[in-house]
Image (tube, grey):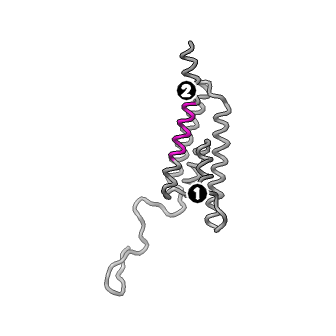
Amino acid sequence: MAVEDDGGRQRGVQMRYVGVGRLGSTGSGALGAAAGAALFGALLVGLLVLADLPSVVPLGYAVLSAVAFGMYGADKAAAQQGRRRTPESTLHLIGLAGGWPGALIARQLFRHKTVKQPFSTIFWGTAAINCGALACFWMVPTLSSLLAA
């Protein structure tokens, strides 16, 4: 809404960017993150069933994702209460180790570290590196067995 100030100039009051919900809303960001994590989980289950992926791999992703989710939630609470924070390097390390699906959901659900750069770039970089490592972990034995046959 626009109102006039004492100088006769118009100024905006109660303005909001188009397409941006109120602070703290989970909206489609959290749903998209959950869908992305679920899709990755389905890929892991598919590899487990169809391609002899060791069962410890999906279990490891689930445990690390739960840990990452808790760490992001605790860091958000610490930020709001002015307490000591979790170092960003620790958050990135848990994502790199395999907790990125849980971190992805937590970032959107808690609205935590979703805009800050370079955090987002590093986050997606660690997720990509982790996925590449998973692909190598799965492909090398598969290719070795194909070449040996």
Q: Residue at x 50, y 58 (%)?
A: 116
Q: Position of residue 145 (x, y in %)?
A: 58, 18
Q: Is 146 rendered above or below residue 25?
A: above
Q: In the rendered image, which quarter contains the N terminus?
A: bottom left
SS type, badge 1: loop
Looking at the rendering, the stretch of residues picked out in magenta corresponds to: 124-136
Say what secondary structure mark 2 lies in: helix
Question: In which image quadrant can residue 4 be found?
Answer: bottom left
- Relative to 94, say whether 5 is above or below: below
User: Residue at point 61% right, 48% down?
Assistant: 93
Q: Which of disc 2 and disc 1 is earlier in sequence?
A: 1
Q: Give the quarter of the figure containing the C terminus.
A: top right
Up/down of 25 relative to 97, above or below: below
Q: Amino acid at mark 1?
A: Phe
Q: Are marks 1 and 2 in contact (CB under 8 Å)?
A: no
Picture disc at residue 137: none
The percent coordinates of residue 52 (x first, y second) are 62, 24
- Marks 1 and 2 sit apart, C-alpha to C-alpha, by 35 Å
Which residue position holds label 2?
139
Q: Position of residue 36 (x, y in %)?
A: 52, 42
Give yes or no for residue 135 being in the magenta stretch.
yes
Q: Residue furthest top?
A: 149
Q: Nearer the viewer, residue 31 or 108?
A: 108
**Residue bearing mark 1:** 110
Decide whether the magenta segment is chiefly helix, strand or loop. Answer: helix
Magenta-colored stretch includes residue 116: no
